[in-house]
């Protein structure tokens, strides 16, 4: 047991002058006396006990005061420890934001669907640290690893195309995600890389980024986003936005190679439902839980001191009114 506010226990020293004052008054004052015509009825043979009993109310009051001070100091116990489950997983969501993500084979479009489903995934894993990396012709970190779900979701909402040079630098995106995770001490480190195209730019080759991820024991789940064959894509023309079908080209062999190299898995999403199922499957696959000791479970112990004070005060009142009565 320990006290949350141990400095308050110094108040117990106030009992010393109170006790000293009481003793001084007893020694200095006259002995109580009572004049009666016949003392026989008062002679019970235990006069010494009766003389000492008159000090009991004061003793009980001191006990009550000491117990009240101890209760105010907030005694606590940390003997018990709660066992809790923790995921121990750090995850970086790596998303392609090239202009091809505006294709409308998903609702409302690829990037809109990817953002909505990613936000649901973020909300479903409150115990994990997560980060967000976006890439097109280059890459950058949208959100560092954090457990702040509200911040992650708000930053995911701000992801859009056109903010960086266009292109599909898969290697750069993966390398940036690996840089976010390489110094992590989490039990498991995961990258979920989503793209709808083929690597066509960037300073880091995707295969090299995959080898680096493997070196740091980082699993990479790759997701190819796009319908089979062709997909409707909005083009700006002098007459406004017109939608035309364009060929869907995803380097599935590369994505499969990255996943296999790092111990992950490749998925192909052709619509919103399929993409949601993929995130759900990844959610189930990354459920490695470990049981650890949490912080001690504290229990309050002030009640025992409060009860001591209460009983001492009640006993003092009973003694004063019914047993040790003072006669003026």
Image: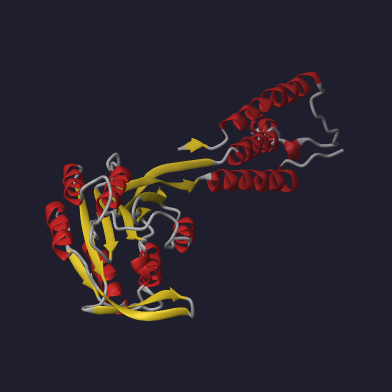
Q: Is residue 26 left or right of residue 156?
A: right
Quarter that holds the N terminus: top left
The residue under the point 40% across, 64% down is 123
User: Is 28 in front, or is 226?
Assistant: 226
For residue 128, side relative to residue 270 (left or right): right
Relative to 239, say whether 267 is above or below. Answer: above
| Image colouring | secondary structure
What's the residue at 55%, 48% (across, down)?
303
Residue sitting farthest toward the front: 238
Image quadrant where residue 38 sits: top right
Q: Is residue 56 above or below residue 161?
A: above
Q: Nearer the viewer, residue 258 or 204?
A: 204
Residue 187, position as x, y percentages in the image: 24, 47
Residue 128 is left or right of residue 222, and the answer is: right
**Closest to the observer, 234 or 225:** 234
For residue 145, above or below residue 93: above
Q: Position of residue 20 (x, y in %)?
A: 71, 21
Q: How many marks?
A: 0
Residue 116 figure quarter: bottom left
Quadrant for the C terminus in the image? top right
Of residues 271 and 82, the one drawn nearer to the viewer in this rendering: 271
Point out residue 226 in the picture as x, y percentages from the top left corner.
27, 73
Q: Residue at x 22, y 69 (%)?
A: 249
Point 35% across, 68% down: residue: 101
């Amino acid at each position: 047991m320990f006290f949350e506010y141990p400095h308050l226990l110094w108040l117990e020293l106030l009992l010393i002058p109170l006790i000293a004052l009481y003793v001084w008054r007893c020694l200095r004052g006259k002995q109580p006396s009572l004049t009666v015509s016949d003392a026989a009825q008062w002679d019970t043979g235990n006069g010494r006990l009766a003389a000492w009993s008159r000090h009991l109310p004061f003793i009980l009051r001191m006990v009550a005061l000491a117990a009240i001070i101890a209760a105010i100091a907030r005694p606590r116990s940390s003997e018990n420890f709660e066992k809790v489950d923790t995921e121990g997983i750090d995850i970086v969501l790596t998303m392609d934001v090239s202009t091809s993500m505006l294709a409308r084979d998903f609702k409302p479009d690829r990037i809109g669907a990817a953002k909505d489903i990613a936000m649901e995934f973020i909300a479903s894993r409150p115990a994990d640290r997560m980060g967000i990396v976006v890439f097109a012709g280059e890459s950058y970190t949208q959100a560092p690893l954090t457990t702040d779900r509200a911040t992650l979701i708000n930053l995911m909402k701000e992801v859009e195309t056109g903010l960086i040079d266009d292109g599909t630098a898969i290697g750069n995106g993966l390398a940036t995600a690996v840089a976010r995770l390489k110094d992590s001490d989490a039990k498991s480190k995961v990258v979920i890389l989503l793209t709808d195209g083929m690597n066509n730019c960037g300073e880091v080759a995707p295969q090299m980024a995959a080898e680096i991820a493997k070196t740091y024991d980082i699993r990479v789940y790759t997701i190819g986003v796009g319908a089979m064959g062709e997909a409707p894509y909005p083009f700006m023309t002098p007459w406004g936005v017109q939608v035309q079908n364009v060929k869907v080209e995803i380097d599935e062999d590369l994505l499969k190679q990255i996943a296999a190299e790092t111990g992950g898995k490749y998925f192909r999403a052709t619509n919103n439902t399929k993409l949601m199922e993929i995130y759900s499957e990844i959610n189930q696959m990354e459920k490695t839980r470990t049981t650890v000791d949490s912080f001690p479970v504290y229990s309050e112990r002030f009640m025992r001191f409060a009860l001591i004070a209460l009983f001492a005060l009640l006993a003092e009142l009973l003694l004063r009114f019914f047993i040790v009565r003072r006669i003026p």
